[in-house]
Amino acid sequence: MGKSRRTVQIVILLLILVLGGYAITTSVSGSNGKPKEGDKAPSFELLGLDGQVHTSEEYKGKAMVINFWGTWCEPCVKEMPALQAQADKWKDQGVQFIGINAGEDQMTVDNFVRQVGVDFPIMLDRDKTSIRDYGISPMPTTFFVSNTGKISTIHIGQLDLDTLDAQISQLAKQP
């Protein structure tokens, strides 16, 4: 009886050591699944406010500004006019703006978008799959993606008009 108990204790100890080693290794190496600058942007397939399902493939070959936001997020709300102004400025130059809402219902998002006057595509991430895939925390977070699909810059926090313009100018210059 004592021998089998000792065996169980050794197996549990080994399991703890293996899992601990894995946790430390992934923490140190930074492979937490979050995309970083230079990585290929994760793909998405989301319902748009237009009622159609949209995928990242639709925007292949275009530079993208992908903004993750929520109506409950004050900095998100404050930056939305700047995003719309830049979307208007850059739309004829191959830069596509995409807003991905963090899990809110369609009516709430639709009312907000109409009230603010946003007309670039807004997607609904109801189950927060894209939020997880992009490793979003906190919001707002904006990804600047080159026309080759690589992440050029990740901006965490509220963007102002000048910062947006500078980031997009850099993005538009990339081959």
Image: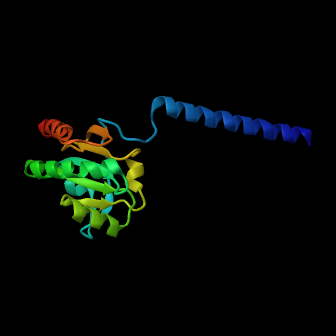
Residue 118 appears left or right of 35: left
Question: In which quadrant will I find the C terminus?
Answer: top left
Q: What residue do we see at 8% from left, 47% from top?
A: 93
Query: Is 6 in front, or is 89?
Result: 89
Question: In which quadrant will I find the N terminus?
Answer: top right
Q: How is the image coloured?
A: rainbow
Q: What residue do we see at 19% from left, 61% from top?
A: 117
Residue 27 location (% of width, % of height) = 51, 33
Residue 4 location (% of width, % of height) = 86, 41
Extreme residue in the right direction: 1
Query: Is 105 in front, or is 31?
Result: 105
Q: What residue do we see at 20% from left, 43% from top?
A: 148
Residue 174 location (% of width, % of height) = 15, 36
Extreme residue in the left direction: 92
Residue 120 appears left or right of 2: left
Q: Is residue 13 above or below residue 110?
A: above
Q: Is residue 43 above or below residue 40?
A: below
Count of marks placed on residues: 0
- Can you tell which quarter of the image residue 127 is in? bottom left
Query: Is 70 in front, or is 23?
Result: 70
Residue 85 location (% of width, % of height) = 14, 50
Extreme residue in the top direction: 28
* Residue 60 seen in the figure: no
Residue 52 appears left or right of 104: left
- Can you tell which quarter of the image residue 7 is in? top right
* Residue 124 seen in the figure: yes
